[in-house]
Amino acid sequence: MAATFAHNINQPLTAASAYLRAAQRLAGGLPKESVTPIVGALDKAVMQIMRAGQVVRSLSELVAQGEPDKTLFSVNLLIDETLSLVAAEAAEAGVSISKRLTKDDDFIVADRVQIRHVLANLMRNAIEAMQDLPRRELLVSTATQAAKAIRVDVQDTGCGPAGKENADLLDLFAMRKDGMGIGLSISRAIVEAHDGRLWAKANPEGGAIFSCDLPLRGRDSSG
């Protein structure tokens, strides 16, 4: 069912993207002073369609993978790997990336591909949230929770929802009609399938912090 959904939704996304790019070419022939706002809106629309398509492609890859392949691995090393995947996008958007990773045991037993999908989705959400803002800083950090779980925080300085400082924002973000909503719903399902929890809250410095807890398993654990 998920594979059929991904295939069917990709078709209208591809068509809509083609129409928008045609509109961009047509707008190029108009006077610059009158067309600038139109081109800006078209660029943003194309970006959102590409983002939604990217999420759907990720869903297809997860479905094609079949049953979860759970192995023992380091969360910090997976974060480094995922950051390298989004580094070009961050640089293009003018986003500076920093990390603060725990030196405690950070090994979990999970499906590496699925957890990387979650991390990449959270990082890309953060990068998108900071577009066109003067301050664009992405911080990824980890911390252990009483030697039972590891928490990953993805913190941005974007435009978090005003007046929601003390709320759990995940449901609010997940209701968005662009690719972020689809991606967050999938990410939450993945984390919960690994006996973890995914949530979001307002960043006191502006923006949002997306966090997930995953159960720890020592590197010497077996079974």
Image (spheres, grey):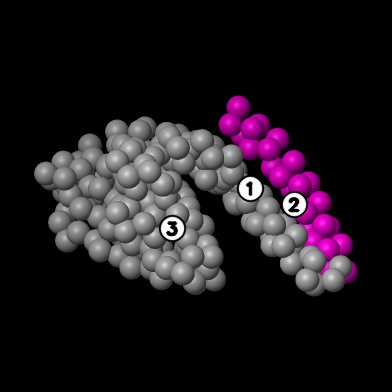
- For disc 3, the marked residue is 158
Q: Secondary structure at mark 3?
A: loop
Q: Could you say which is closer to the camera, residue 35 or residue 130?
A: 35
Spatial separation of the CA atoms under disc 1 and disc 3: 23 Å
In magenta segment, residue 6:
yes
Image marks 2 and 1: residues in contact by CB distance under 8 Å = yes
Q: Position of residue 204 (x, y in %)?
A: 29, 54
Amino acid type, callout 3:
Gly
- Measuring from the top left, give residue 11's x and y in whole percent: 74, 41
Q: Dot 1: few (<14), some (14–19), or many (≥20) neighbours within 10 Å?
A: many
Picture quadrant of residue 68: top left
Q: Image quarter for residue 207?
A: bottom left
Sequence-earlier tag: 2 or 1: 2
Q: Which residue is mark 1?
A: 53
Depicted 34 relative to depicted 165: above or below: below
Is 197 on the left or on the right of 125, as rendered?
left
Prevalent SS, magenta region:
helix
Q: Which residue corresponds to mark 2?
A: 17
For badge 2, the amino acid type reads Ser
Residue 182 appears in the figure: yes
Give the side of residue 174 with respect to residue 78, left or right: right
Q: Residue at x 81, y 51 (%)?
A: 19
**Front in this rendered view, residue 8 or 73:** 8
CB atoms at circles 2 and 3 under 8 Å apart? no
- Is 86 on the left-hand or right-hand side of 217? right
Q: In front: mark 1 or mark 3? A: 3
Query: Which contiguous range is marked in magenta?
Result: 1-29
Mark 1 or 3 closer to N-term?
Answer: 1
Image x and y of residue 95, in percent: 45, 68
Give the structural element (helix, strand or loop) at label 1. helix
| Residue type at the position of mark 1 | Gly
Residue 159 falls in image quadrant: bottom left
